[in-house]
Image: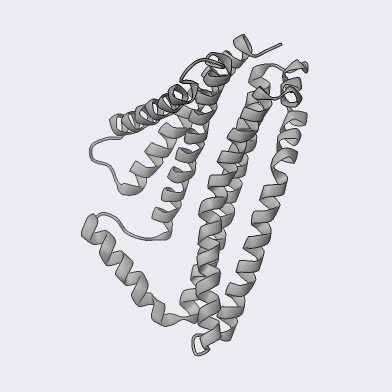
Amino acid sequence: MKALLKYEFRKTWFAKLIFLGITAVAEIAFLIGIALGPAHETGERLVTIGALVLFMVAMFGVFIIGVQSVLTLHRDMNTKQGYMLYMTPRTSYQILGAKTLENGLSILLSGAFFFLLGFLDITLLFSRFGTLQQLWDFFQDMLHAINKEITLNTQTILCLTVSFLASWLATVSMAYLADILSSALLNGKRFNGIITFLIFILLSVLLGWLQDVLQPARVAIDAGLLIRGGVSLAFSVLLYCASAWIMDRYLSV
């Protein structure tokens, strides 16, 4: 299993290095802007550009990690070079488990990294550009207008991040199952792509329904976010078991 996990990391390391490089450049620009201070026009411009790039990298980085994992699985099931993986003395549960674990760890580590980086950068920003506290208060008032129970603080943002990452992992797991069904049972059949997409949509609807049903009617915002994240993780485990079983039965050589 350890060898498979290293193999999966090697296949996805290049894209991660690109995102880390972009993050480093944006962070340097942000820190230079912070050092120049609010009285310097260039400083404000660098802070704005750096913060925007960091936010975009954080969002799209996690998104690309999941998409790349799905594309790698699809390539492994539909090319001769990738299909050689299934001829190794490894079970489908191990092969898919390595892919799922690598994707889960990548999403978790990248999410934790950007959360901590964002927390530190925001702390520096407010300590240096004190007038931006008005912008923070404005966001607080907007959230209170939507729901008085929502408080924009570190704990809520952390719970929101955990829930988002768990939901994205579940989304990737849904894509895994849909793609495995497409390659194992629907390959070469008419309307394969449409059926695969519909399977993905149905799984997404099912997850949303489970989250609504299993979440108590009256619960704090933070607890509700964690419950939805827990449901997403449990759903991912079920999808993994179903996907590995189909692979073991229809794709193993």
* Residue 133 in sight in this render: yes
Q: Residue at x 63, y 26 (%)?
A: 97
Q: Residue at x 24, y 60 (%)?
A: 144
Q: Is 200 located above or below residue 57 in the figure?
A: above
* Residue 148 in sight in this render: no
Q: Indicate the quadrant containing the N terminus: top left, top right, bottom left or bottom right.
A: top right
Q: Residue at x 56, y 17 (%)?
A: 187
Q: Is 111 located above or below residue 66 in the figure?
A: below
Q: Position of 194 compared to 76: left or right? A: left
Please state the horizontal and vertical placement of residue 242, each as a whole percent of the image. Answer: 52, 18
Q: Residue at x 38, y 38 (%)?
A: 228
Please state the horizontal and vertical placement of residue 86, each as a whole percent of the image. Answer: 72, 18
- Looking at the image, which is closer to me, 180 or 5? 180
- Looking at the image, which is closer to me, 149 or 118? 118
Q: Indicate the quadrant containing the C terminus: top left, top right, bottom left or bottom right.
A: top right
Please state the horizontal and vertical placement of residue 226, each as a whole percent of the image. Answer: 40, 41
